Image (cartoon, helix red, strand yellow):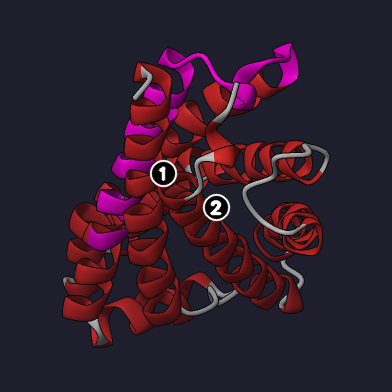
Amino acid sequence: MPNSTMALRAAGAWLAIGSLLLVGALVFHGPLAPDMDVQAKIIADGATRWTVVHWVAAAALSLFAVAGLIVLAATSRLTQAWWTVTAWAVLLVGAFWTLTTAVAEATAITGAAVSANRAMFEAWWSFAEGKATGFLFLALAVAVIAGNDARTPSAATPPWASWTAVVSGLGAVVGWALGVWLDIRPGNLIWLVSSLVMSLWILWFGLALVRTEDALKG
C-alpha cells in the first residue's frame, strides 16, 4: 500500500472521529444567546454540560488539526493545487484557533459564569469571541475542500453532498457574522444548523477516505 494512501486513510479516520464528536458538541451546545447576561445564566445553570461540551469540542478540533497535518504531509489529489493546499493549512490553523476558545469556555468562562463575576466573564467572553473567528476560517476551508471534491472525478462523496457542504460552510460563516457581529438573533441558529450539516459531510468524507481506494489516488 502506498504511504500516501495509508496517510490519507489515517487522516480520514481522524476526520470522521473528530466530526462525530463535533456533531455531539454542537447538538448539546445550542445557539448562542444575543444578550451576554442571558448567556452567562445559561452557562451557570448548566455548568457541567457546558464544560463537557467544550472539552468534547476541543478534542474534535484537535483531531481536525491532526488530520490537516497528515493531509499536508501526504502527496495526493487532495493537495494538487495551491488553493487546496492553502485550504488544508487554513483548516489546521482554524482548528487551533477555535481550540483555544473551547478550552477557555470549558474553564475560565464557566467559572466566571458560576461565580457571577461579570467583569471576568466579559473579558474572557471577548477573548473567546475573537479566537472563535478561527471557526469561520475552518468553515471556509471546508467549503473549498468540499468544492474541490465535487469537481474531482474520483470524488469521495456524491457531488450533491459536496455542494451541500460548500453551502453549509458558507452558511456557518454568514450565520456567525449575523448572530455574533451584528446581533441578529436568527444568525445564531443559521450558524448552528449550517455547522451541523458541514460536520456531517466531514464525517462522510472522512469515512469515504478510509474505505474508498479510488478516492485516494493522486
Q: Which of 125 and 98 is in front in this view?
A: 98
Quarter-of-image position of residue 27: bottom left
Q: What residue type is labelled 1?
A: Gly
The answer to whether one can see residue 91 in this image is yes
Q: Which of marks 1 and 2 is nearer the N terminus?
A: 1
Residue 116 in the image: state x and y as whole percent: 24, 72
**Label 1 – label 2 distance at C-alpha:** 7 Å
Q: Judge left or right: residue 62 versus residue 169.
A: left
* Residue hosting label 2: 205
Residue 7 in the image: state x and y as whole percent: 35, 27
Measuring 32% from the left and 32% from the top, which residue is drawn there? 66
SS class, disc 2: helix
Specify the quadrant that holds the C terminus: top right
Q: Judge left or right: residue 50 versus residue 141.
A: left
Q: What residue range appears in magenta?
A: 56-83
Image vertical order of residue 152 relative to residue 88, above or below: below
Q: Nearer the viewer, residue 77 or 112?
A: 77
Query: Around disc 1, counting alpha carbons within 10 Å, would you say few (fewer than 14), some (14 to 19), or many (20 or more)?
Result: many
Query: Around disc 2, counting alpha carbons within 10 Å, would you say few (fewer than 14), some (14 to 19), or many (20 or more)?
Result: many
Residue 105 in the image: state x and y as whole percent: 30, 57
Instruction: Count all numbered tags in the image, as a single digit.
Output: 2
SS class, disc 1: helix
Image vertical order of residue 32 relative to residue 211, above or below: below
Residue at the extreme bottom: 45
Magenta region includes residue 164:
no
**Disc 1 to disc 2: CB gap under 8 Å:** yes
Image vertical order of residue 199 relative to residue 103, above or below: below
* Residue hosting label 1: 12
Name the dominant secondary structure of the magenta segment: helix
Q: Which of 215 and 123 is in front in this view?
A: 215
Q: What residue type is labelled 2?
A: Phe
